[in-house]
Image: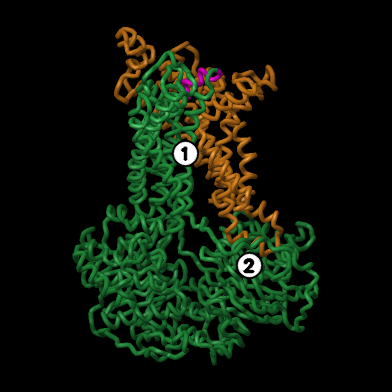
Amino acid sequence: MTIFSELWNNARYRHLAPSVIALCLLILVAVLAPVIAPTDPLAMDISGRMASPSAAHWLGQDEFGRDVLSRLLHGARISLSVAFATGVLAAIIGTSAGMVGGYFGGVAELLTVRVAEFMLAFPPILLALLVIAFTGPGTGTLIVTMAIFYAPEFARIAYGEVRSVRQKEYVEAMRAIGAGPMRILRTTILPNIAAPLFVQFSLVVAAAIVVESGLSFLGLGIVPPTPSWGLMIRGARSYLELNPMGLVWPCLALVVTIFIVNSLCDAVRDVFDPRTVKVKGLSFGRRRDRDSGNGTNETLADNVQLSVNGLRTEFATPNGAVAAVKDVSFEVRRGETVAIVGESGSGKSVTSLSIMGLLPEKSAAVTAGRIDFSAKSGKVLDLARIGPDTARALKGSDVAMIFQEPMTSLNPVYRIGEQLVEAILAHDKCSKADARKRALDMLRKVHISDPERRLDQFPFELSGGMRQRVMIAMALASRPKLLIADEPTTALDVTIQAQILELIRELQKEDDMSILFITHDMGVVAEIADRTVVMYKGEAVEAGPTEEIFKAPKHAYTRALLSAVPRLGSMDGQASPMRFPMVDRETGEPNVPDVLASKMHESDQPLLQVRDLTSRFNIRGGLLSSVQGRVHAVEGVSFDLKAGETLALVGESGCGKSTTGRSLLRLLEPLSGSVMLDGVDILALDKAGLRRQRQNMQMIFQDPYASLNPRLAVGAAIADPLIINGLASPAEARQTVAELLVKVGLSADMAARYPHEFSGGQRQRICIARALALKPKLIVADEAVSALDVSVKAQVANLMLDLQAEMGLSYLFISHDMAVVERVSHRVAVMYLGEIVEIGPRQAIFQNPQHPYTKRLLSAVPIADPARRHKRRPIANAELKSPVRPADYVAPVRQYRDVGDGHKVMVWDGECD
Amino acid sequence: MLTYIVRRCAVAAVMIFMVATAVFMILHVVPGDPIEVMLSADGMAPDPATVAEMRARLGLDLPLYQQYWDYLTRLGSGDLGRSFQDNQDVLGNIAQRLPRTLELIGMATLLSLAAGIPLGVVAARRRGSWIDKASGWISSLALSVPTFVLGTLFVLVFALMLRLVPAGGFVPFSQSPADHLTLLLMPSLAIAVGFTAVIIRMTRSTVLDVLEQDWVRTARAKGVDEGKVLRRHVVRNALGPVLTVTGLQMGSMLGGTVLVEFIFNWPGMSGFLVKAVENRDYPEVQGIVLVTASLFILLNLIVDVLYSVLDPQVRKS
């Protein structure tokens, strides 16, 4: 019942109502046909052949004098029952086959999905005809035949959906708490793939109605004299000229029925499509040329490039207009870099899109304020008021922009050269050959390796860092006066980030260009910005020279933000992890002391001993799908972890840190090595033993949005591990859930809510509670705080530190964020290309790094301290190396040099420089 | 690219082989003797002597592996057997009728793409406008009318009531091109209406997806004019899914023209199949299924290759 009221209260579900009601009426008519039909549909009346409508026969009589209305009503019965029976049968067969194939892969996949794909190679109506050729027509045959031919569609969809849902972290989390595959398929996966299957079901019902009537029409479906719409059309066709209405009625019945089923199908699809949210409150028409482009009366001071005054940008939402940016004002001077910094939802990106004129056309608009810009032509233009033509002429030529996601910001179907040439030709009349020459020059300017070859490559052939260089080349092709950089390094690895920041600085100097830099990262701000604007909830709360903001923040929010920012080097001389100091956002006062009791027992046997752990994946290709190479994701990794200790596993993308974590829990089966947890060899356990042991080790994932099952109340999610492992009765589990929620800083009454009602930080707390339910000794935290906003990140990290102090937990803290790692860990292992290149106490690694890769990594980390901006070492322009090796590669045996106090460094042979 | 095509061809060849085997199996392994089914017209038990004779004629008295081998070698030399009904060469019969069915499918596809893609793009670009709403309603309605219903209504309205065109039939192109095309128009329109609706919907939803992609924003940020953004960065990228759905639709038409050919007396292959099924002419049914399924596989192969032309990532992997 709660489901229905919930559905009704959700406006999006409400628009299912008309088609659901129509379908219910139709089904009612079909069910009640024997009662409501005026006569027996089979009763013939030769005298009344093709009689016109009369009081006794509202729709007239057919060629045998049978009542048309009664036959129509009974036809609905046949049509719908055949169609629904077909749909249900096909759905059951197809979905189970597809789910099993998708989840287990291997032989199961071959037997189910490949067979289904093979069957899809036949046109269904053809197959139906083939079967009927042997069996002869009949209702039962028809249903079974059609079900068999529609089942493969379900199998294909279920397979595809399972493959994508299977990757989701909440499914991995279920495996980590010891749920068996059938349980996962039934309770976790099925509800999440039900929507597309339901859409398919309604499609099949509609298709089955069509095929049934079509076959009956041909005389190969329903056997006369059973009333079927197809047969009625067949009969009427012979007497078209005598009695055209005899054709129209069954046609109409058929069309209306299919239309109702199709509308239901569309409505369901819409409900699950986020794009169809109805918005109200604002109707932003197309922007007209309110200004001729001849400039404003406003004059800007000589050295001012951009002046934003009282900017307000509103978005249309289901609840009316909402201002994402409120009364924001700032200036960017010539040759200056201004950073806009803020957390998610602060309005910083909307500000940049407002300036660039790239707001989504119909759902957002600048509603107040001025954006005065000094163009190349010498005029001052108000960017909030110019028309589309003037704006287009400025974009790319006077103002250019680079974006966060280099992987998706280039069009995948055009070569790099084509996209650069397009940017050049948009503003300059020159020949294609000249444009190509200029494109090549630009690629050289952004120091991309092998620029000639890049011109003819496609975006997917380039790494993220290279693509961002291409984006910069494209943006600067027409020497803009202002570059807007919206989180340009956020998606990149730290060493690549350092290179890109260096490049932007270099190009800025060459062209005396102004930069508006949007970021959430205080470290990057300190590295690059001359002046900084701090945004919070759509407002610019503080603006000033970067050094002043860092040294003496005035606004409470700025103080809170800065205190939560981990600063590399702030832990010099500290042996144990420390909590982040917290400052209240509203008052700006510090409110939590940062003392922490350590529960680590120095002399204890290690809780976890990992030896020579190796995980490789084959890369197949070529004609015969032979092994072309291997990803050596984890190669000979060994380390110890004590009770109550945090070991951080750090490195950049592809270094194998996540694979190591998953291999320990056997979420991935490692190739070789040994993992001893509390004296038990994890890799030697059978399935049941592994399920028991998983209670001792749990995992927290990176993405708080993907790691909770969206269709499960959070209380049930936390209780799951207890119930599945039979450790508590439902009542006991409820009690435990309440305690756990309080323990992670939430309240017990939140158990009944669903994940979408929580913020990212709260969800991560729920994930922690779920991991704690089994009272594990070890928690593998895979980038557990990386996706969170800086202040939330600090809170969740503090929670983890508190829980460790209280419960003596051991953490394997997998992270790319060196500054957070410095704060929370006892020991650190640096991974590079699948191997640990350096491991030791945290202080030793940070203050006395030995391996060249560790040094490179540390020097690339932006430091949130403008005073140290120019003290950095230069960064080599190296690409990240890949752990993909040829198939015949033999991993070398590594030697480690002991630096003392447990600090060990891999002996390197120049490969790492 | 070459590796990719060779791979796809190999897969297609294996599929055709499997189809041939499946057709063989249906005749020989499925319980129930198809010969008896074939001969037992009107519920009368067939004469055992006739059955034996027929079995010998079709080589069904030989061991299974022998029959399978003979079957494959005959297929290999392009021999699909002789019709049980009129003792004509099945392949010859098919070769005569197949081009007419393909012509129908080709015409319907052309009409649908020509109308569907522009309408879909406009509906997406002007999302929420009257033209979007109108095309949405019309395509919903079009999708709800089965082809055979539409065909029958066409006959009623255009041929019998308005007397604009003949009710059906076929004139070879060589005899009278004008009459040929006139007769082609109604059946292909009857097929094209639903097909166009599918293309409109697919184009609209893909274009809406692509419009939200980052690279479209990049193109706008470069100052590329809006028409060019739409042509080069939106429509070009949206063609892939449209191509896929076109392939699927054309494939389903290979069987789906049955009803339209029946209604308009178009002497194509599918109508031929219905007759073969009614007559329980096994060699003919088998031949038609084999040819149609092979065409279907071939069509998928063509779609895959075209797709790789559209998507460089598929081409280069």
Quarter assignment of residue A308:
bottom right
**Could you tell me if the residues under marks 2 and 1 are in contact, i.e. CB atoms within 8 Å?**
no
Q: Nearer the viewer, mark 2 or mark 1?
A: 2
State which chain is coloured orange.
Answer: B
Q: Position of residue B165 (x, y in %)?
A: 65, 22
Residue A186 vs A910, above or below: the answer is above
Q: Chain of mark 2?
A: A
Amino acid type, mark 2: Ala
Q: Chain of mark 1?
A: B
Identify the residue at horizontal 43%, vertical 25% (top origin). Answer: A216
Residue B133 visible here: yes
Identify the residue at horizontal 35%, vertical 12% (top origin). Answer: B42
Quarter assignment of residue B285:
top left
Identify the residue at horizontal 35%, vertical 82% (top origin). Answer: A826
Q: Please tell me how crowded label 1 is: few (under 14), some (14-19), or many (20+) other residues with Cα within 10 Å.
A: some
State which chain is coloured green.
Answer: A
Residue under label 1, please give it.
B11
Q: Secondary structure at mark 2?
A: strand
Q: Position of residue A291 (x, y in %)?
A: 76, 68
Residue A670 visible here: no
What residue range appears in magenta? A233-241
Q: Is residue A430 left or right of residue B280?
A: right
Amino acid type, mark 1: Val
Q: Is residue A301 left or right of residue A598?
A: right
Q: Which mark is residue B2?
A: none
Residue under label 2, please give it.
A365
- Residue lying farthest to the front in this orientation: A55
Quarter assignment of residue A739:
bottom left
Alpha carbon distance from label 2 to label 1: 53 Å
